[in-house]
Structures are given as structure tokens and as C-alpha cells.
Amino acid sequence: MIEALNVEKSFDKVKAVNGVTLKIRDGEVFGLLGTNGAGKSTLLRMIAGILIPEHGTVCVDQMPVYDNPKIKKNIFFISDEPYFFPNSTAEEMMTYYSNIYAGFNTDRFTKLCKGFELDTTRKVADYSKGMKKQLAILIGICAETRYLLCDETFDGLDPVVRQGIKSLIAGDMADRTLTPVIASHNLRELEDICDHVGLLHKGGVLLSESIESMKLNLQKVQCVFASEEDMKQVQEQLDIMVHDVRGRLHTYTIRGERTQIEKIFRSVNTVFFEILALSLEEIFISETEVVGYDVRKFILD
Amino acid sequence: MMSANLFSTEGRKQQKELTQRRAWAIVISALVLLMYYPLGVFILVTRTHSYGYMSAEEKYLAAVSAVRGQIGIQQFGFAIVMVLAVLLALQGFDFLFHRTQLDFYESQPVSRKERFRNVYLNGILIFVALYAITMLVTLIIAAILGTVNIILFLEILYEFVRIIILFFATYSVTVLAVMMTGNLPIALMMSAFLLSIEYLYAYVIQYYARIFYKTFNQTNSSVTAIGSPLYHAVNAVERVSKITGSTDGTITQALLRQMIGICFPGDMITLFVALTVTVVAWLCYRRRKAEWAGKSIVFGTIRTLVKILVAVLAALICGILIYEFYSRGTISKNITRYAMPVVITIASVLACGTFEAVLSFNIRAVCRKIWHIPVVIVLSLLIFGIYKNDVTGYDRYVPAVDRVGSCVMYIDGNSVNYYEDNLKIQSKPMTTIKDICI
């Protein structure tokens, strides 16, 4: 299990991570979501043992991870900009990693590279950006560590490769209880792979919940009220996160259970109302909007 | 960069793996060493064969001298060795300057201690191996050309150890510079700073003594920078050249012993500096954080200290320049001397701003940390004032008659000012002390 307890990290005078507390259980896919500069990469780099927290602790399997090779042998970190030795080939990188990670599966790596059509004898420098990312992910998977930390890893991959990688991760989770932690902006990517999501904003955790319960506790309702009184009556009873009005059409993002919300709307006169499914992206926008991060502001300004 | 003892099979494997990734540095080092040593010896020795006016014995001595000059204690190859040490240290620890490489290395299951040890030793091992091979090839060439004798062999052997110590010290100082900085250009500057600052300060301070002390005699007070490996390397060559210059080229066992005796204390200090700096570099590495990659000088206190030291030095040098520019002209020396504090003050302000801009990578940062400016002005003027007003009482010192064995008058340099009416007096030791000390 990965645990971050009240972790803080600053770069110069900017607080990148501010009092983050998170638990990542073994065997679940944890998605780290966040606005730009929210501290996703910083948190991931602390979990990988690259950065040392200023306050708090980051423990993996109840041991501090920083400068701890015993724990680090269970972790593989895939950076947003993977590094390969100059003039090296995929084969050479494989040899290097097989010396570092005792469980590195070279046969599997060769087979996967063939499957993903990566020429292992070609210089990595000549690969495209997407191919380099593929190679980094394949190395990470073949290292066969218990934890796989991916920083914006799926960006730049074509849909077919992305699906292939997801299948590999799912397979490893089933076979050897791999625990992937994936930081991304691409919410649609995380929606279909993650079990649990941690939402970071300005260095702090806005929420950390399973996607299922997140969807169960957040509803989007479109409604046309018969009168102003009906609207006021409904609004008094709801925990409204976002309210948007276009003409007579009101769109709400509301915290609460679907049945409860449905009951409230049915108790007043409405011309029309409908409860819509919320995507992870909408949840992300709603949650961050509540704390003042309104994407529309940028567009309007 | 994995864990294992250097002398175990795993350790050797790791060193081999690390070495493979440093091919270009090895190739450059090998080429430079081969060009300077074996090729240099071959050219110099074969050239002596064409000296038609010499007897066979004179030719032999000239050839041996040529070999000695190239790979013996008097060699100037130490400068090349120092450059290679800087190159290998910078290349080895270059990963500390790049975030992507730090993410790559620091996320791997290797302790920081092992990583430092492996990379640190790798640079030294590369040089020792290359230098040993180069020396062997050079010796074979010299032997084929018939110039190697037992004394020369012993001298070369001792010089081999000296060069390794010098490399070790320069390499360690550069590693320390890397640990204290966050990017390559600043690391290079820091390395130059650490290697030369004591020497430069000693030189500048002595210059001020020469300007302001009437009794200061430069010929008896050469610049000393006790903690500088560069100083000990240069000093050894200078001092050994003095004693070998008075011979016909024949180096006897006694002379060799004398030469080693001259070099040995400096070499031991250099070794001590190397060991101390290695420990400091390791401590800095332990405290160094991954997020410091790309910064200039990563430790705030050291940044301030370096900036102030460099700015004070620059201000003092400007003071010397203004003195040198005008003191030989029609302008009175006194006027120049009074102009010096003004120039030093202006130079302090400019140097402070410039170095702040360089260290911040931002030209607009010239006015940042403005409190450094008065500190630099005060320190520069303090040093100037100490020499200008002879605070230490250098000129006031008169030794007791019974403590003077002999004395001499020099009419070069600043002593001209002191003995203005005696310009024609030649340097001549005087032993009738009582006649002089009235």
C-alpha cells in the first residue's frame, strides 16, 4: 500500500504539494487528476523516491521510500519525459534495466516489442515521441514491479496502442496484483481504467474516492421550472455545486444521491426535468469550480 | 549505477557498464594523452638526433632532458591532466543537471551513496587506466630511442603518482563544484573559482602590498596559495627547474632525492585537499535535492559567499588596473591612489550586479539582493585601506641588529620608490650589518 501522510513540498517559494494525505490500496488503479500545477507530478515523484517531502511522510508498504532501494525495487516510475541513454537501442536499455530490476522479464519485453512493432535494434533517439513512450511503458511493465507510477504516460499514444497498454496493465493486475498509479489530465482515459481517483488542486487533495461512489454522489440535472417559487423551493433543499441558467433552462451539478434528488424535483411543479449521467470530466470541472478554478473564465477573458 | 563492491564481479560489471556510456569522454582523454605524451616524447627525442653540433654524450643528455621535460617532474602536462579531470568530473555527474535524468536514476533501486561512489570512482578509474597505458607506451618509446635510465625511470614513477594525486584533487574539486551548482556553465565557473580563488586572492593581495608597502620586496615573496593544487603543481615545476637548470642535464640520485623533497610537501597537501574535498562533495551530494537541477548555485549561503568573494576580487583588480594605467604617466601616484577607492567602489557595485545577473540567468536581476553591494564595498575598501594605511605595520618593522645576517638592496620594482636617490646601486649583498644599521 502507498500512503502519503500530510505531505508538503515547495519549489522556491511556491507550494507544489500542500498537506496531501492519500492511501493507494494494492491491486487498484489509482488515477491522479488535477489542474495544471496541482502537484500531480510532484506527488508522483515523491512516491517514486525522487523528491523528499519537506513535511509529512511518503511510505510504500509502511516504509519511507526516499533513498530506500529495498522499497524502490518494487516501484517503477515512468516519467512524462522518459530518458534513454544517448545512442542506445531498446535492446541495450533492456539489458540495463535487467541489471537494475531483478524481476525484469526480458523474454516478455522482446515479445511485446515485436507485438507493438518496436525495432529493438534501432536507436531510441530515432523513435517518434509516441514510440519512446511505448518503449518506456513496456520497460515499466516488464520490470514486473508491484507498483507502476505513470506520469502523463498515455498522452501521445495512438488509440490502438493505448488500448493495448491498458489491456497489458489489466492483465498484470489480474496475474500479479500490479498497482498502477496514473497521473493525467486526460479524464476520459482515466474513467475507463481507474477504480479510484485522487483529485488535486493547488497542491491539496480536493477528493479521493472511487469513481463509482463519486458518480453516485454527484448528479447533473437539467430542469425548466413552472414558477420562481418552485425554483427557490428546490434550491433550498439541494447541495448545489454548479448552477447554470440559459433562458428558462437550469442546469445543476448537485451533491447527493440520485433518488433523493429526484424526489425533491418531483415535489415541485416542473415543465421538464432530467437527471443526466456525469462524466469524470464534468465531475473534475465541477469540483475544481467550487474551489474557484473556473475554466470558462479563461475562455471569456 | 547499481549496488555492489567495486572489487566484486558485480562491481566490475557495473564499472564496465558505466564506462561504456562515457565513450566520448574516454576517446577525447585518450587522444589528448597520446598526442601529448608518447607523440611528444617521440618528436622531441628524435629532434635531438639532428643536433649535429653536439657530441654523442650531449645528444644523449639532451634526449633524456627532453623525456624528463615531457613526462618527468618538470612537465607542463599537468595542465592537460587538470583539464581532463574537469572534463571527466563534469561528464560523470552531468545527470544532476537534468530533471529527466534525475527522474531516471533517482527512481531506481540504488542508494544515493552507491550512485555517488560508483560514478565518482568511475572517473578516477578511467583516468588512471588511460594515464597508465599512456605512460607505458611513452616509456617503451623512450626506451626504444635509448633515453631511459634508472634515475629517469624513478623520476617518472614518482611523477606518475604526483599526476594521479593532482588529477584526484582537481577531479574532487570539480565534483564539489557540480554538487554546489545546478547547471553546466555555472558548474564550470564554480570549478574555476574553487581551483583558482586562493591563488588569485594571494596574487592580488601581494600586488597591493607591492603598491603600498615601501619595503615590500616581491622577489623574496612569491605568491603562495597553500590549499591550491594548481599552486603546488606550478611551484614544483618552478623550484625543480631552478635546481636542474644549474646542471648539465645529468640527474644524479642525490639530485632526484632533492627534487622529490621539494615536491613531496606540496603533493601531500594536494592529497589532503583531495580527500577533504571528496568528503565535502559527498556531504553536499547528500544534502542536494533533485529539484535543484537547472538552478545556478544550489546552496544559498555558498551562493552569497561566492558572489561576494568574486565581486571583492573583481573590485580589487579594477583598483590595480587603474593604478597600472595611470601610475606610469604624468598623473601623480598619489592622485591615482586616491582615485583607487572611487574605482573600487564603482567596480564593487558593477561586479555585484553583474554576478547577480549571471547567477540568476536574468539581466533584470542586477538589483536583487541589494544588501550584498554595501558588503562588497566595505570589504574591498577595507582590504584597500589596510594596505594603503599600512595597518599591519609592515613598513614600520625594523629588525634588531643581531637578527640581521645579511641584507641586499634591490632597485627594481617598488624599491625604486624607497631608494629614490640610489637608482644606480646594483643589487649586492651586504654583510657589514653594523655599518647599515645605525
Image (cartoon, coloured by chain):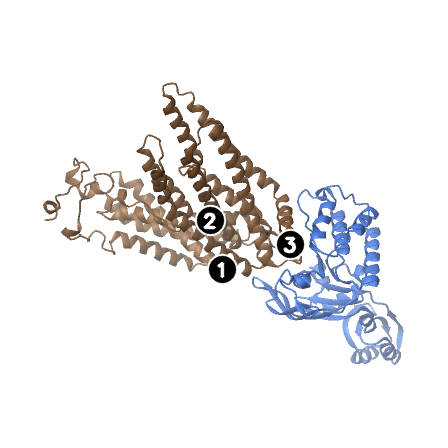
- Of the image marks 1 and 2, the number of the one nearer the N terminus: 2
- Of the image marks 2 and 3, the number of the one nearer the N terminus: 3
In this rendering, which labeled residue sits more in front, label 1 or label 3?
3
- Of the image marks 1 and 3, the number of the one nearer the N terminus: 3
Give me the residue at 76% from left, 53% from top.
Answer: A137
Q: Does residue B196 appear in this view? A: no
Give me the residue at 34% from left, 46% from top.
Answer: B203
Spatial CA distance of label 1 from label 3 is: 31 Å
Chain to which mark 1 belongs: B
Give the residue type at disc 2.
Answer: Ala
- Residue identifier under label 3: B2
Q: Colour of chain A?
A: blue
Residue B324 image position (x, y, % from top left) = 30, 41
- Residue identifier under label 2: B169
Q: Secondary structure at mark 1?
A: helix
- Left or right: where does residue B406 sit relative to residue A28? left
Residue A55 image position (x, y, % from top left) = 60, 70
Which numbered dot is residue B300? 1
Give the residue type at disc 1.
Answer: Gly
Q: Mark 3 packing: few (<14 Cα in 10 Å), some, or many (20+)? A: many
Decide: is B82 above or below A41: above
In this rendering, which labeled residue sits more in front, label 1 or label 2?
2
